[in-house]
Amino acid sequence: MGFVAPLILAGLAALAIPVLIHLIQRERKRVVEFPSLMFLSRIPYQSVRRRRIRDWALLAMRLAALALIVMAFARPFFKRDSLAAATQQGAREAVILVDTSYSMEYGDRWTRARAAARDAISGLSAGDRASLVFFSSGAEVAVRSSADRGRLDAGLASAATGPGATRFAPAIKLAASLLAESALPRREIVLISDFQRRGWEQTPGRDDVKLPERTVLTPVDVASGETANLSVTPVSLQRTRFENHDRIAVTAGLVNHSTKPVSGVQLSLEVDGQSIQSLPASAAPGGSSSVTFAPFTVASRNMRASVKLPDDALKRDNVFHFVVSPSEPVRVFVIGRAGAERQSLYLARALAIGESPRVELVTRTPTAFSDADARQAAVVILNDIQAPDDLADRLARFVREGGGLLLATGPQATWPARLADVVPALPGDLIDRTTTTPSRLGALEYSHPVFELFRAPRSGDFSSARFYGYRATGQPAGQVLARFDDGTPALLERKTGAGRVLMWTSSLDLDWNDMPVKPVFLPFVHTLAKYLADYAEAPASLTVGQVIPAPRRTAGRGSATNRGGTIAIAPSGTRVSVETEDGALELNEQGFYDVRTQGAGSDSATALAANVDLGESDLTPLDARELAAAVAGRAPGEIAGLGAARPSDDAQAQAQRLWWYLLVAGGLLLAGETLLSNRLSQSGARVS
Amino acid sequence: MRNEIQAGGLTGARFVDPVVLARVGNLELVARAVVDGFINGMHRSPYFGASVDFAEHRGYTAGDDIRRVDWKLFGRTDRFYIKEYEADTNANFAVLLDVSKSMGFGSRGITKLEYGKILAGCLTYLVHRQRDRVGFAAFDEDIVEFVPPSAKHMEVTLHVLDRLKPTRPGKLAPPMKKLAEHYARRGLLVLVSDFYEEPQAVLEAVAPLRFRGHDMIVFHVLDPAEIEFNYDQASAFEDLESGEQIPVVPESLAEQYRALIREHSEALRSKFSELRIDYALLNTSTPLDQALFKYLSMREQLSRVKR
């Protein structure tokens, strides 16, 4: 209850004056100041003696009459009723959000969630509309704004839990957009979930989630009691090379999401369906531990491996799948002048170091580079040579089919002008800096993949190398990735056909610069080779919900010109067609996917391992009020939407009509008091 | 004067009675004496270097700000180099001090408000020395003073603290709700009050601040007389805030009263722990070390988590 003019209530204080005087007079002896009587007043106190009041009824009537009149002038109204009446009028638009993440498979959570959703549907009145949305990592509308309960029930019947992880932000955003389309006066979101903390904290986009005005969020928590769950961790693979074969040691972990320690849990490793090894593991409450299996040899491509735990209340997080293949080297052909092997010495030594990827270096003279070489090569480096016409033609073809070419232009380098559309620029005049200050590398394009590695401070100092000579270029046709301090391009890139061409306008030996003896040279040539070969290490495992570009094999370039459509076979056996060009594959099942290119033979098949998001196995609950407060932008306890509602004028007048009754009652009491006091005074006079 | 206090007068400030500190008057002096004395007693220094650390030199490239060129190096090498720094981040810190009339109560020469002022001053001074931004808010039933967090606001805060007087009755919820809107950027908030409200109401008042993501420490300041209730004469007890009086016979009520205040403190402790807020009950007769130590150990825990 509230008052329109609460200040008038101060008049009530006057009523207490005679009573207070009575009380204070009795206890005047000593007054002790004390911060708060909050606790003292709770302790029952028995008064010793009270001054007798003779006419209780009369006093009560007078006080009551005065109180009623004062309250009438303060114009009381019932806040809750009026506002609730205003917001409870009219039809309702509801969005029922049902969590279908895999943590809902724990215990009876899913049964309870379905029951809660059925209750929400049966709670709809005539004229109400509701949408049904299932969410996990993403959100999907099952039934869009319908008043038909049959449709909603059918939509709910089709619901099933999936391998996704809980993410509240996209679901609430979708619900907000559905409600924004509605013209109905009342809006409500019913959020049915087990409210995992991980689903809200540390999720991107949570700060952007805001509910529209006048929207009520009703959380329905289906989690209960203490939880106990074990899960595996993503594996880490240690690759070693032994007698030309890759061997892999798998390290896997066990996480204990419960309050009791576990011991002797068997972690088993399976490769291609066969159990290889089983190791026991123990973990403290809320802790984790890891085991390393004995290394196994990677004999063929796409070997499917899994680490498994025994089944518990939540099964999906007890297995981790991954795929391993033998590492394939990047073949780099260096074409240099005959008899000038020293020229490629630094380059060859730098590329020979490193395992990820291994670089297989082949040296050729300009005349010896054949078509067969071009088919094998991933990258070709022209190290300061005059490119003859037939070699240039071959390389142009090589690049257009997807190869990578690096032109290092020292004093000798030339490139036929008729093939200028292949390279970023034609090598021009020599710029000699031996007589003046040597040049240094100035502006680098740190956003480009070639220099991205060196972006952070103290990760590669290019400015220490001195350049005494380099070649000018004409107007470059491609992007300039690095410049010397006089503005001349040092590294240029051009994308030609499906391939890439980089041009380094100085030499790769010590003739024109001291770059090869600087620490940055080794990582620099490795990133150049990786970038030109378009090398990306295939991930051993992926997560459900990831969208990946259709996998393609880089080896065997040129042979796959008859490439047909790409087909992915999901773990459940469903066939998904992936567009060859710019195609993408969404992983929405847990297990191994088989991706094949039609007409390219079984050699082109690639296996992908999709795992559930293991963060979901942490069942720590979130206070639903915290979520409601965060999305509503209001303090908890304040019902979202009610505060913003404006009742109509009629409703306000209705709610404030109480003053009229109070005034009449006060008047009647005063009349009664007059009669009673007259009678009492008369009888008193008679007695006296 | 300052040297005198640091060197002789107040050495071992950790054992100085708050009543003595309250008599010193100059809040900055008190804060300095307590904090320096306290810090000298710790093993690890809480000072964290300069706010910017030199990281590396880098060659000048077109477009760089010429003010950042290292001219000394240019003098030596005839080349342009840029000095690069790694900036430290600094956190927001604010003390929210209750200045309602009930805080004006003191039975042993220092009122709860004076104790709270010294505590706020010390924490502000300590945090300012760590190069964090300091702010301050005083409230009763509304916000009375507000100093937004800034690296330059220590003097202002101490000045504002000095002038505070208890004038009005207090109510926690309305000022907390307003303050939640003031502190947009996440930081560390220290709430100092005597919490004469129901624990649930206190929790609901504080929750908006916590839900904005602030880390919070709550100091519940009580006078020894409020905790021990060692009155002996039957008297009329008057509420400092409402002026209400009730007759009290201390002998018969003391036990029940102590049980109630213990219960209240325990209820607050458990309610705050639900929101993961650190709670400490401070008796104004105890030295300030306890509060400072609580604050520092909390900061240490936080930094350990972040690492």
Image (cartoon, helix red, strand yellow):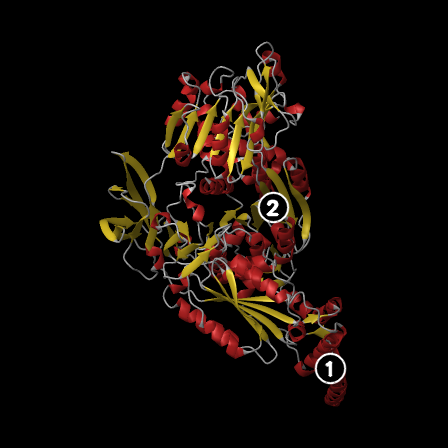
Q: Position of residue B205 (x, y in %)?
A: 58, 57
- Name the foreground residue: A10 vs A209: A209
Q: Quadrant of the C terminus of chain B?
A: top left
Q: Position of residue A306 (x, y in %)?
A: 30, 51
Q: Position of residue A364 (x, y in %)?
A: 40, 25
Q: CA distance from mark 1 to mark 2?
A: 51 Å
Q: Which residue is mark 2?
A: B185
The residue lying at 40 percent from left, 23 percent from top is A348
Q: Which residue is mark 1?
A: A661
Is A48 on the left or on the right of A669, as rendered?
Answer: left
* Mark 1 residue crowding within 10 angstroms, few (<14) / some (14–19) / many (20+): few
Say if residue A400 shows up in the picture: yes
Q: Chain of mark 2?
A: B
Q: Chain of mark 1?
A: A
Q: Amino acid at mark 2?
A: Arg
Whether B35 is drawn above or below A516: the answer is below
Whether A206 is drawn above or below A457: the answer is below
Whether B290 is drawn above or below A467: the answer is below
